[in-house]
Amino acid sequence: MATEFYSIKKLASTNVQYLIPYGMRGNGKSYSARDEVYDRFKDETHKFHGKFVYLRRWQDDIKSKEVEKYFDKKQFKKQFPDADGIVSQSNEIWTYVNLKNGKKQKIEHIGYYCALNEAERYKSWVFEDVKTIIYEEFITDKTYLDNEPSKLMHLVSTILRHEIGQVILIGNTVSQINPYFEYWGITEDVLKMKKGEIKLFSFHNLNDLQIDEVVELAVEYCQRIDIKNNMFFGQVAKQITSGDWETKE
């Protein structure tokens, strides 16, 4: 029986501004998110039709080869049959075809790539036609940026400007200590979620005209997939094989 990997479709159907799928590593979260942005780029009838931004925390994580490795998968060939691959240069992601002389010819500009720790340098940039931002590994057991949730909000405003878009924050259950959940005040609610559950959170802001503006988050604790591997033990074992939160002494 084939393993049923995670699909972001149900979470995305909530149509809220922020989507947060989190759970075990290797369950298909990133794969499904790529499928989603490819679909949106192709489907002009989609609410969030347009280009995307691939976001990571550190500049070292978005070197050209790393970006191309992340996106240039077999699934890309299904969505872009006329292209030979993806090339990333100067913070832009393009599809390309191979020429007879061995060079690559760019075809379509489908997205951008950025690092959150470099957010200041993007303030004067224009991100044309972007409707979706994917932030990979927003949960970490290493180091967060100072005031990181605030930095993300500012970068989202830079990228989307006056447009309505969607931010997908993909996380693994590596550490319950998370400045994002604390910043939004949802830590206790998230930690009580069961696998497969989707929970909606609403945040109210009064604008200058005293009009109530609502921002919504949809959080999904992704269902586990079967891993037929007995190589893991100790405290980390359940996180790898079941998606339980990893805890440390």
Image (cartoon, grey):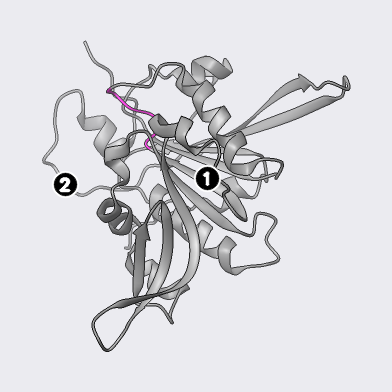
Q: Specify the farthest residue to the left.
A: 231
The percent position of residue 110, horizontal first and vertical second, equals 50, 62
For mark 2, give the secondary structure: loop
Q: Nearer the viewer, mark 1 or mark 2?
A: 1
Q: On the picture, is 118 further left or further right than 50?
A: left
Q: Which mark, by number, is residue 133? A: 1
Q: Which residue lies under the disc numbered 2? A: 229
Span of residues in magenta: 137-142
How many C-alpha atoms fall within 10 Å of the one at disc 2: few (<14), some, or many (≥20)? few
- Tell me where residue 179 sits by quadrant: top left
Q: On the picture, is 6 further left or further right than 236?
A: right
Q: On the picture, is 83 further left or further right than 227?
A: right
The amino acid on which the numbered mark 1 sits, given as a three-letter code, is Ile
The amino acid on which the numbered mark 2 sits, given as a three-letter code, is Asn
Residue in the image at 60% along x and 54% along y: 128
Residue in the image at 63% along x and 43% along y: 160
How much space separates mark 1 and mark 2, taking CA atoms? 33 Å
Q: Earlier in the sequence, mark 1 or mark 2?
A: 1
